Amino acid sequence: MKQYIKVDEWNIIEEGFIAGYNKISESIFSLGNGRMGQRGNFEETYSGETLQGSYVAGIYYPDKTRVGWWKNGYPEYFAKVLNAANWIGLEIRIDGVVLDLHDAAVSDFRRVLNMKEGYLERTFTATLSSGKQVAVKATRFCSIVDDEAGALRYSITPLNFDGEIEITSFIDGAVRNQDANYDEGFWDFVESSIHDNTAYLTLRTKKTGFEVCTGMLFHVYQQGRKLASAVTAVNKDKFVGGKVTVAATRNQETVIFKYAANQTSENHATEELLAACKKVVDKVAAKGFAKLKEEQLDAWAGKWQESDIVITGDAAAQQGIRFNIFQLNQTYTGEDARLNIGPKGFTGEKYGGSTYWDTEAYCIPFYLATADQQVARNLLVYRYNQLDKAIENAGKLGFNKGAALYPMVTMNGEECHNEWEITFEEIHRNAAIAFAIFNYIRYTGDVAYLAEYGLEVLIGISRFWAQRVNWSEARKQYVMLGVTGPNEYENNINNNWYTSTMATWCLQYTIESLAQVTDAIIRKTSFDAGTEVAQWQHIIDNMYYPEDAERGVFLQQDGYLDKEQILVKDLDPSQRPLNQKWSWDRILRSCFIKQADVLQGFYFLEDRFDMDTLRRNFDFYEPRTVHESSLSPCIHAILAAKLGDGERAYEFYLRTSRLDLDDYNNDTEDGLHITSMAGTWMSVVEGFAGMRVRDGQLQFTPFLPESWQSFAFSTRFRSNILKVEINKNRVVLENKEGGDVAVKVYEDTFVVKAGSVVQLNNRDLVK
Ligand code: BGC
């Protein structure tokens, strides 16, 4: 854990340059706009430790899998988000010496991520080996208005000399992924050009053949005037730039404005890429930096209006939650159903930038409440569009007749994860995808989605479950063998309660949804209603779920109680995290649980269980859970809140809220935990505010963490936007948009009339 980020409600601030933390900061200061992303790398040369990362959404490389022992069914490759051409690059030479903070004495270093307005600013003073001193201020953003573009302003002021500054503004595509399996480059050169102050570089991905054209235009200003300096072309391998030399005077600012854009063959025919890229570069350059920044501010104001959570009384918590919301909004905007949310978003290479069950299980609720319903819908449509591949994927494993197994990890619908115990066995992902359909419809009321897209997916998934279980003659029940639950610290187990419970839930939900089935769906899926429904119902009625009657708990899997039962509190702290300290064998044999597993089921299907059952299971599993997945504490926070244990709910919330800002798990340098950020949001809205939708009605069972004076957020709900504030004395509901709406708070229902505010005194509320 590190606490070098200054607490501030709207800004992420680093003061003083600690080279050893640079990669952590590069993750934290990442920028994105849903279509492109950029780690917080320096614009100028940096020869110290760094993880360079510029990413373009939807562009990936199928890196051939490297495993010791190949197993049939393994995918050929692991898709990787690509480190793409660096568009921020500037090489600055001062009287011949390269400005490089690794070689210079650095003072007054300050890096600020302005979350309110959506830009990054860095200031510092550097004394070069030549003794020459410059003050630098660099500001940049990825535009969320022109989402194919980014812009930067870089100013250099000589502090103790008059001299020459040589500036090379460039696009560098000679980049590599750190996680390349065979250390190869993933890009081939297509073309480049430089005319005066404008340059373009087009690269093509190997194998996948995606083309990306990156363009840039730069200007240099002094004393408010654009300089007409001659530009010398710089051409190298996959690198193109323009060099100018300017005379600089002591205490006089030289300012570089750089505008850049990425266009991809996903959106334009390859022969039109260059023209499309030019169009965006010209457009943003014509707007100019100040205007772009102003538009950025306005656009972010709109995003904050919808998605902010305002906490009073705890600045660190405020900063934490805003950082999470900021990053989620930077990662996914919902405008393109081909895109999704990688666990690291655009902030690192880990997890390949691909889609996991995280999207459906953790991210959907955030986007449902904070954005137009089209955004969450697009996340669902993404899976619909990959249904054929999911059927193919199941086929490769021996399933048939339209059974669909969605991949554990994917870019284009094909599986690209290759550890057998996860690829073949962590099949609960299928259930999360079905649950997201249910969740979306429960929240939005968009039942038409079933006939349009949802049912085909549900039928495919249900067919998979029906084939994946088998009848046990010994038990005279259905069993599900050889699975891995969400707790990846157990593999190849039989009858994982969560997976089996969610499987029969899927079957049930599909049967209920058949009321919306159309002839077209029946034809397309060759659905045999009579036989298939009867089979599904038989499975629902005869499924085996492991339980321990004596303790009154569901068992995570068969044999869980055979394990030596030790509690996490009795573990020597030096042994943690287990995944870094223990052998895999020891982990697998231990009772320790990586993340919510049985409790994940209690979260999804909460209305099936009474409070006593929840309490018994929570009290049993929580003390055995090590939370070594960042996705775990939020589920525990929500359930603890439900059980009325505000203190523990808050404790769990704290573990996720500042996970990356404080580098809690010592892994922020790899990238941010984007999908778990949605879990942090869930902890506040579903945990502390107790927000639920039941019977088409919004409900709250709020409590206020002790150290907060209040918290407030807005939520969309069908045609309404409601603002909810919880303070020490009241719950305040404001109906900001839409007609009258009935809302339940604890046990009572109140009508909040259109445009009005209802203030409920705590003492009048039954808790
Ligand atoms: C978790 C998975 C998760 C993945 C990506 C793993 O550590 O166990 O549940 O899908 O990370 O976030």
Image (cartoon, rainbow, N blue to C red):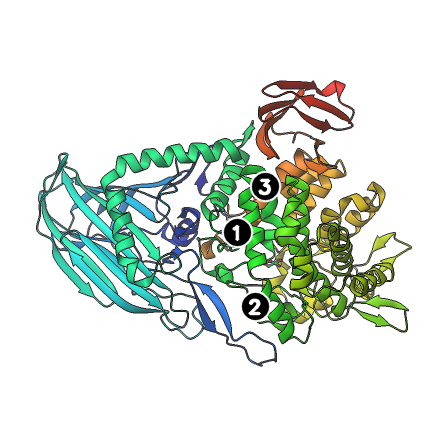
Q: Tell which circle, 3 or 2, labels the residue nearer the N-terminal end.
A: 3
Residue assigned mark 2: 415
Amino acid type for the residue under numbered disc 1? His
Secondary element under disc 3, as helix, strand or loop, is helix
Picture quadrant of ligand 1: bottom right
Q: Amino acid at mark 3?
A: Leu
For the residue pair 275 and 562, the one nearer the viewer reads as 275
Determine whether, in the image, residue 522 is placed left or right of residue 96. right
Q: Position of residue 750 (x, y in %)?
A: 72, 23
Mark 1 or mark 3, earlier in chain: 3
Q: Secondary structure at mark 1?
A: loop
Measure the C-alpha gap from mark 1 to mark 3. Answer: 20 Å
Could you say where residue 91 lies in the image, as x and y percent from the top left?
21, 54
In space, the residues marked 3 and 2 are separated at their CA atoms by 27 Å
Please indicate, yes or no, whether residue 259 appears anywhere in the rendered image.
Answer: yes
Residue tagged 3: 368
Task: Find the residue positioned furthest to the front.
Answer: 519
Mark 2 or mark 1, earlier in chain: 2
> Disc 2 vs disc 1: which is toward the camera?
2
Q: What's the residue at 33%, 67% (across, down)?
A: 204
Side (left or right) of 113 relative to 427: left
| Real-space Cα separation, disc 2 to disc 1, in angstroms | 22 Å
Indicate yes or no: mark 1 CB to ligand 1 under 8 Å. yes
Q: Residues within 10 Å of mark 1 (few under 14, many from 20)?
A: many
The residue labelled by disc 1 is 673
All told, the count of numbered labels is 3
